[in-house]
Amino acid sequence: MTTQPRPKSRFKKLLVRLATRVLILLVAYVLSIGPMYWKWEDAMMTGDNDTLLIFYMPLMVASELSETFRTLINGYIELWVYA
């Protein structure tokens, strides 16, 4: 005889999976600025690619709000710029 998982247990597993996926996407988003830096810089200077500017705007805002985040993200970008 098999027992069905309790509804709370299934809900908890669903929440853990969802939180994990959101965390992975958030980390991938933040790390994506490194390889995209030159395109983002070009968009900042020329204003040609508004979509790219809007996409990375939260990182700019976070950098302005947190000195620690700014230091970390700038250090990461430098790995891509000077590599």
Image (cartoon, rainbow, N blue to C red):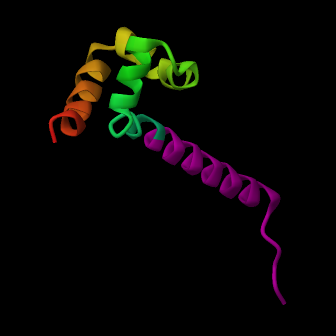
Picture quadrant of residue 71: top left
Q: Position of residue 22 (x, y in %)?
A: 58, 43
- Closest to the observer, 17 or 74: 74
* Side of 25 relative to 64 (left or right): right
Picture quadrant of residue 33: top left
Q: Is residue 77 above or below residue 19?
A: above
Residue appearing at x 81%, y 85% in the figure? 2
Range of magenta residues: 1-28
Residue that extends furthest to the left in the rendered view of this protein: 82
Q: Is residue 7 above or below residue 49?
A: below
Residue 68 on the magenta span: no
Q: Main secondary structure of the magenta part?
A: helix
Q: Is residue 56 above or below residue 3?
A: above
Q: How many marks?
A: 0
Quadrant of the frame with the N terminus: bottom right
* Side of 18 relative to 48 (left or right): right
Q: Position of residue 10 (x, y in %)?
A: 75, 60
Residue appearing at x 48%, y 13% in the figure? 47
Q: Position of residue 73 (x, y in %)?
A: 29, 28
Residue that extends furthest to the bottom in the rendered view of this protein: 1
Q: Is residue 63 above or below residue 20?
A: above
Quadrant of the frame with the C terminus: top left
Picture quadrant of residue 37: top left
Residue 2 on the magenta span: yes
- Closest to the observer, 82 or 64: 82
